[in-house]
Image (cartoon, rainbow, N blue to C red):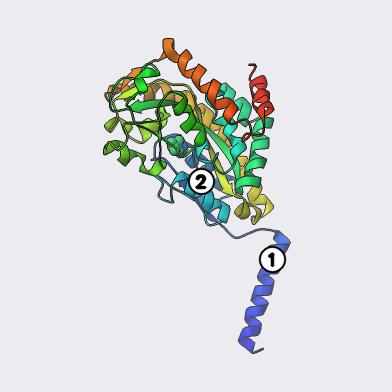
Amino acid sequence: MNRMTKLVSMFYFTACLLLLTTGEASAKRFKIAVGDAAGGTQDALGKKFVELLTAKSGGKHSAKLFHNGQLGSEQDTVNDAALGTLDFSILAINNITPFSPTVGVFTLPYVILSLDDAIKLTQGDVGKELIDNTIRDAKVRIVGWAYSGFRVLTNSKKPIKTVADLEGVVVRVPKNEIMLDTYKSWGINATPMAWSETFTALQQKVVDGQDNPYITVHAMKFYEVQKYVTNLRYLFSIEPLIVSESIFQGLDEKTQKAILEAGKETTDYSAQYLRDSEAAIKQDLVAKGMQIDNPADNEKEFIDRATKVVWPKFYESIGGKQKLDNVLKILGRS
Ligand code: MLT
């Protein structure tokens, strides 16, 4: 071994020893994929998380948000995080379900009927079990939850107030079997499409409509290409922050703790963000020319059809009928 090689080896040995003694990794600048444009729930969650993670790590670690699907479609980011080529992603729960089917219990129509329901489920035992299942099945860990409100239906063709009004309207949905089957129960074949392609498809009239929460419709500027809104309440949108499990396991304990604590506090912040912003955003969409229709009197038909057909079809994938029964019991329903 020459003198130079000896020096390099000594330096390497000392660095490893230091890492083992302190148990600390070097400063990180994590990448966080964000499916939506800036200005919505995902953005609010992401910014808060970065702020808290930086503070909790004493300024050592930081993270950068990449909006608008720059790092891939939402479903692609789950794959990338599973492979360890992406650190974090913020995405809609329905885009995790294909990789971790038991999470589908949060995507079943008309199960979550309010923000309180969403909080109770995500932050209780059901949420804990789904976090474990998602690590097992999808190799990603949910470290925070964002709440975006109900997915309302928008379209450029006509007001939709009844199930029958859906006829002839081409609706984009995520590549999610539960959502496809929900529209099927209402009599139409929806078009599965990645989120990152949706604005262009609406603009070019490849599809007439889509569903997403008011905050997302606003952040994505869908009012530029959509006129009509149907105030559906079939799906309450939950948007988790996930971290690659292999990357998480490679971090020192202090950093893991900072991530988990930042995620928890960000979750609380997200609920308040929804309470504070949804009404004003809805008003602004009307000011921007959107027409909001309420299917109130006709909602029973939407509910009856979807729950009767879709729930039983997915009992097996969510882990059995008793999983849904338990969720409904927790929510005080039968
Ligand atoms: C989707 O429709 O694919 C997602 O809900 C979009 C989003 O994450 O906002």
The residue lying at 57 percent from left, 58 percent from top is 27
Q: Secondary structure at mark 2?
A: strand
Instruction: Classify mark 1: residues with Cα within 10 Å, few (<14), some (14-19) or many (20+).
Output: few
Label at residue 228: none
Q: Would residue 179 be seen by someone viewing this image from the given angle?
A: yes
Locate the C terminus by quadrant: top right
Residue 82's x, y, as percent? 57, 52
Pointer 2 or 1: first along the chain = 1
Q: To which quarter of the image does residue 196 belong?
A: top left
The residue lying at 66 percent from left, 58 percent from top is 24
Residue 91's x, y, as percent? 49, 40
Locate the N terminus by quadrant: bottom right
Q: Secondary structure at mark 1?
A: helix
Q: Nearer the viewer, residue 131 or 11?
A: 131
Q: What residue is shown with label 2?
A: 89
Label at residue 18: 1
Instruction: Examine the rendered structure and indicate whether residue 175 appears above or below residue 281.
Output: below
